[in-house]
Amino acid sequence: MNANKPASRPSFKSDLNRVDAHTVSAGEYDELPELTDGMLARAKVNKGGRPVSAHPRKLISLRLPVDVIERWKATGPGWQTRMAERLSQGH
């Protein structure tokens, strides 16, 4: 989490309780257009999420002394990235 951004819940611009309470009537189905093969051909699936990294990281389990971890954590946010950069230098 970014230390400069306040943690707040996303707000919706809809009355979700009213939306959840709504029951769809048969007449509302008549307002919907017929689904055609052309519509399906233009459809695109958006999976969302993060893009695939060119340099993906691999999760491992590593046991380190508590004092080493605490010294890295004391350097502030981003300590894991800095530790990875230091380890990749080979010193």
Image (cartoon, helix red, strand yellow):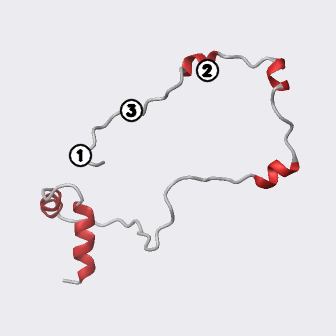
Q: Nearer the viewer, residue 70 or 7?
A: 7
Residue in view at x 68 percent, y 53 percent: 45
In the shown orientation, is residue 11 left or right of residue 20?
A: left
Labels 3 & 2 near each other (Cβ < 8 A): no
Q: Amino acid at mark 2?
A: Val
Counting from the top left corner in percent of width and height, residue 15 is at 53, 20
Q: Amino acid at mark 3?
A: Arg
User: What is the number of the mark on residue 64?
Assistant: none
Does label 1 or label 3 sit earlier along the sequence?
A: 1
In the shown orientation, is residue 84 left or right of residue 51?
A: left
Q: Residues within 10 Å of mark 2 (few under 14, many from 20)?
A: few
Q: Residues within 10 Å of mark 1 (few under 14, many from 20)?
A: few
Counting from the top left corner in percent of width and height, residue 21 is at 63, 15
Give the Cα separation between the discs numbered 3 and 2.
20 Å
Quick one: SS at disc 1? loop
Counting from the top left corner in percent of width and height, residue 29 is at 82, 25
Which residue reaches farthest bottom? Answer: 90
Quick one: SS at disc 2? helix
In the shown orientation, is residue 54 left or right of residue 38?
A: left
The answer to which quarter of the image holds residue 30 is top right
Residue in view at x 86 percent, y 37 percent: 34
What residue would you read off at disc 3? 9
What residue would you read off at disc 1? 4
Quick one: SS at disc 3? loop
Does label 2 or label 1 sit earlier along the sequence?
A: 1
Labels 1 & 3 near each other (Cβ < 8 A): no
Q: Amino acid at mark 1?
A: Asn
User: What is the number of the mark on residue 19?
Assistant: 2
Residue in view at x 67 percent, y 17 percent: 22
Question: Is the residue 57 above or below the residue 73 in the image?
Answer: below
